[in-house]
Amino acid sequence: MSKVTSIEFANLMRETISEGTVLLKNDDALPLKQDDVVSIFGRCQINFYKSGTGSGGSVNVEYTTNLLDSLEASEFAKINEKLADIYRNWVKENPYDNAGGGWAMEPDSQKEMILSDEIIEDARSVSNKAIIVIGRTAGEDKDNRLEAGSLKLTDDELQMMEKVSKYFEKTIVILNTANIIDMSWLYTLENPPAAVMYAWQGGMEGGNGIADVLCGKMSPSGKLTDTIALSFEDYPSTRLYGRKDFCVYEEDIYVGYRYFETFCPEKVAFEFGYGLTYSKFHISFEPVKIIYEQNLSDSKKNNIQFLVTGFVKNTGDFPCKEVVQIYMQPPQGKLGKPSKVLCGFYKTPVLNSDETCMFEIKFDQTRLASYDDTGITGCKSAFVLEEGDYVFFGGNSVRNVNRLDVECRNEIKDSFHVEKCTVVEQLEEALAPSSSFNVLKPLEQKEDGTYEQCFVPAHKRSYELETRIKSNIPKLIPRTGNININLHDVTFTEQDGKPSLDDFIGQLSIEELACLTRGEGMCNPRVTHGTASAFGGLSDNLCSMGIPAGCTSDGPSGIRMDSGEKATQVPIGTMLACTWNPEIVEKLFTFEGKEINGYNIDVLLGPGMNIHRNPINGRNFEYFSEDPLLTGIMAGSVSKGLANEGVFATLKHFCCNNQETGRLVSDSVVSERALREIYLKGFEIAIKEFGAKSVMTSYNKINGFWGASNYDLTTTILRKQWHFDGMVMSDWWSSINDVMTGGDACLKNMENMVRAQNDVYMCVPNNGAFFNVNKDTVAESVENGKLYVSELQRAARNICKFLMSTKAFERNQEYSEPVFDILPFDEYSNEYKVKEFSDKSCMKVAAGKECFFKIEEDGEFRLVARIMSTMPISAQSVTNIFINETKVGTVQTNGTQGAWATIVVSRIILKQGIYRISAEDVKPGIVIDFIEVRE
Ligand code: BGC
């Protein structure tokens, strides 16, 4: 029995897995039947991946499940045990290779067992079906590659497929992958497999969930959230992918199915939205109802709603769910548009054979609108409906759809007609690129309905950022000095005599304001051990004024605590999205929220929600889809689920973190239209429609400005245009450049971050916020007039307001540094008396090593370590330090690029006697020069 994960949570994960599993092909091989006997091939039946790697995969789980064990345990399946033993022994002799476990070191795939004909023949003689498991991983700082062993199969894997399918008529391929992989083998194998399914990585219940599906306890009902092209070279973003200096998004808004359906549908192997179940469905549609909603106070805000209703009938004989998908085809107009755009969807409940359900899908005109960044329609910087016919399609994939009738003012038509270009939302130009480049646009329509491609210059920024920033400096909150207002006294409703948040902020000194903008971490001792950061009340004074220290933790698929505490790991983002079921995702994250609460964590660093621009991206597993609507709804559902338990989701990485290669330095060069329609859209939906309150900016630059110092991103768009009123944090140790002119990175110039309204810098070393150990120039900039106090107050206000809505505000937060009181060994053991002792001022303790020291006199000491890491700046390494059996500290560092730092590990009380000190790596990479016991 798990102590951490309840049966209900585990069962919900299993259900989610069945809903997110995508069945691509099934020639009567699945579900397994009572009398089937199965031979399972491929090492990943045992080394079944639970997630990708990096911060998004590092959950310490209490248990995990693999396919072999789960199938064995299932009452439905009979397994070829002899083959299972062969694999078990082989895996024992050829253990999983994680390349030492260091940051971003784990290989994308593992060596496979070479199969002799004899083994397979033997297997065939005792079983009638074969399962082949192919596993792949990817992760943070580690993109996949378009090569064998990564997105392509290795020769050994191909041989395994060839040989197994020679002997077995019914071979089932299970893809236990972080990402979609190249599927060309499906078309080149002499005997292609009878069934293929994406099992993704289902977290700790992954094995059980997939076993449920294989055995027919549940039907798969997942649908692809990405287009699988015949050749991965065909994705328009592949050409320039992975450049470290800058990456031009030349395909513009034509990402995924928007590209393939418009220009080259013949290049698609499996289309967006596709996925089989064990049953069959008939979907019927009523005409789409157009509902005009008049806004009596402002006719410019008149709204149009679209209501799609119909029926789904299970015409097969297996109980399961189906997804209804609605697409629209806008007129090409002057802007040029994709041939299909997803504008709504609905997942049915489980329908039994012959059972029917009604559905209702409602969306408004914003789902149909395109952004005019050039002014070509006459409505510059606005979301518009260009004149022409908007055609609707309904079905169960972007391809398998029928054209829908439209009922408008009691008349049935074949489309929704817009008379003249209409502004849906007037904005102002923001985040536009300043460099010249060309972007893709459809040209002539060809006979087959697709379009010729052409490239046109992207619109360049036509406003002065400096003027914009300077003309929007906030008003100063009168400065009063400390007048004894505690944050707990503050009220948001005007009440006689009660202080407002502004009154509170007015008390803070420049140093206090600056301190608030610095988060500390990782593994900060003020908050739950082993988590990502603490922020807010990080000095004694700020604490005494009632500002709590908030706690953040990775995310997204469970709580990461490098101290070794256990937590639940849910399925990866892609799998969640493939459910097309926002309700189940919300429910799952309500459970997750409860667990997070139990650990006194306030903010989860997730969901990751960057667009799947290219299958190579190592962090696609954390993200949802190539489509922004689906992405926004899924991220919103995660946020809503956590909010049900008072926990905050952090939408990350804002925005265009679409490659891991060069992620800290690369400039994503994107048109404003593509930003608005694709890369920002999901964030906009999660914020406006689901009320998300915390955002993490991305490591990369977006049109010349790093995410953490990008004024248009975090002020003009996020706050002014979307009315976001939460808190923004940077990614960990991220770069900053000049908020007005861009240019090179300078970490110290954090005033640029404050000015952009990226409220908190994550992170400075522990105990470093108050002492400003990074020597940032925020306070100095106020003195020399480069930054206004009011800008600092604005950041402080955002942070305090956010903290007031967290559970941290309710917690008793008397912070006192933990002191470990440890008994010497010689009180209960003689064996240590024979050891050699180190000088306690210079103990050489490396991971996995131990040494002994003697304390001559009882006393209180400090444990200090000199550490460094030669790894890149964003690489995270963690080591736990033990004295005797007691864990006295978790030492964490990012890459220091060779520079040494001396850090305090903890305070200890020791008595006269003998002690052992040892270190144990959680994530290798820290080099410890020495550890010292200081008086
Ligand atoms: C990642 C973030 C993560 C943070 C803290 C960064 O390297 O990009 O997604 O939340 O580290 O672990």
Image (cartoon, helix red, strand yellow):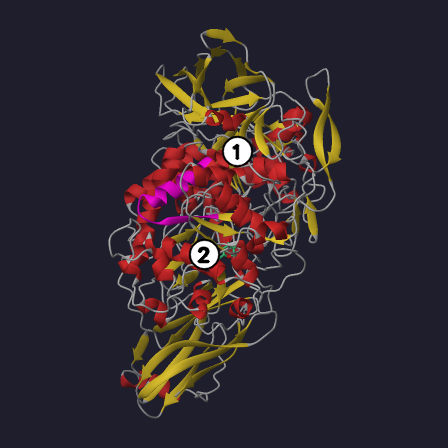
x and y percentages locating residue 308 in the rendered image: 44, 18
The crowd level at tag 2 (other Cα within 10 Å; few <14, some 14-19, many 20+) is many
In the image, is residue 645 part of the stretch drawn in magenta?
Answer: yes
In the image, is residue 77 part of the stretch drawn in magenta?
Answer: no
Q: Which mark is residue 635?
A: none
x and y percentages locating residue 731 in the rendered image: 52, 56
Kind of residue sitting beneath label 1? Thr
Kind of residue sitting beneath label 2? Arg
Q: Which residue is mark 2?
A: 794
Decide: is 897 above or below 902.
Answer: above
Decide: is 372 above or below 647.
Answer: above
Decide: is 126 above or below 654.
Answer: above
Q: Look at the image and tell me whether residue 691 can be seen.
A: yes
Residue 899: name its quadrant.
Answer: bottom right
x and y percentages locating residue 853 in the rendered image: 40, 86
Q: Which residue is mark 1?
A: 225
Q: Look at the image and tell me whether residue 560 can be seen.
A: no
Q: CA distance from mark 1 to mark 2?
A: 39 Å
Camera-side residue of 129 and 752: 752
The crowd level at tag 1 (other Cα within 10 Å; few <14, some 14-19, many 20+) is many
x and y percentages locating residue 482 in the rendered image: 34, 69
User: Residues in magenta?
Assistant: 633-651
Q: What is the count of numbered marks? A: 2
Earlier along the polypeptide chain: callout 1 or callout 2? 1
Q: Residue furthest top?
A: 411
Query: Helix, strand or loop at disc 2?
Result: helix
| For residue 419, side relative to residue 374 (left or right) | left
* Residue located at (55% from left, 13% from top): 415
